[in-house]
Amino acid sequence: MSSDQTAPASCSPDHPLIDRSQVGARLRGIRKDQKLTLKQLSERSGVALSTLSKMELAQVSVSYEKLAAAARALGVDIAQLFSPVKALANLLQPTVVSTAIDSAAGYSTGNYDYHPMAGDFPGRRMTPMYARIFARELTQFDDYIRHPGQEFAVVLSGRVRIQFETGESISIGCRETAYFNSGIGHIYLAESEADAEVMVVMTDY
């Protein structure tokens, strides 16, 4: 969903952001529980060793792409990096879980704030996420974002342009949607005067 940036705190009091040091500590804790070195996690995930080290030390905010790659390599849901790991194995499979957007912990990259939803549903096959889009220019990104699977987006407020590395783009407004192959490089840009709000659902395959 975003490119690596050293991110300022969000100005929105309605959508809490988790401190990146907590994300780093959870990543490190899960890695150590699995007795993996940073080098081994780097080889499994494809994320540079130096980037993983900075992630664990909270020296940089990183994109969904890299956090998701690390989580996949560790065999955990990305939501476990945003909230305390729960002993889900001992719980019955729920019929439904509900998450309030305004209380879901999120993470800022400077270009986006994103908030994973329904992280307490065990064995999720989709990753739903609320995002606020701040970025307005391609030059704000180091590269296009790519991750396995497919992606569905619906705009909740404002207007968004999704730019693809193929040169194609789509502009969608409130209550309009887009569905695409997220393995193709893509970037979300706010086109409205105010920051845009988007609900995104992603798959890992």
Image (cartoon, rainbow, N blue to C red):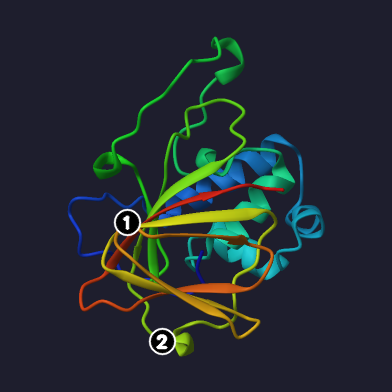
Q: Residue at x 76, y 39 (%)?
A: 35
Circle 1 sits on which residue? 175
Tell me, yes or no, whether the two marked residues, 2 and 1, touch with CB atoms within 8 Å.
no
**In the rendering, at what x and y percent does residue 73 appear?**
73, 47
Question: The disc labelled 2 sits on which kind of residue?
Answer: Glu
Q: Is residue 73 left or right of residue 28?
A: right
Residue placed furthest toward the front: 176
**In the image shown, does 32 or 152 lie closer to the viewer?**
152
| Residue pointed to by mark 2 | 137
Residue neighbourhood size for the residue with mark 2, other residues' Cα within 10 Å, grouped as few (<14), some (14–19), many (≥20): few
Q: Residues within 10 Å of mark 1 (few under 14, many from 20)?
A: few
Q: Residue at x 58, y 32 (%)?
A: 124
| Mark 2 vs mark 1, CA separation in Å | 23 Å
Confirm whether residue 154 shows in the render. yes
Q: Quadrant of residue 38?
A: bottom right
Residue lying at the far bottom of the rendered structure: 139
Q: Residue at x 27, y 40 (%)?
A: 103
Type of the residue with mark 1? Arg
171 vs 14, nearest the viewer: 171
Secondary structure category for the residue under label 2 = loop
Percent across and percent down for residue 138 are: 47, 86
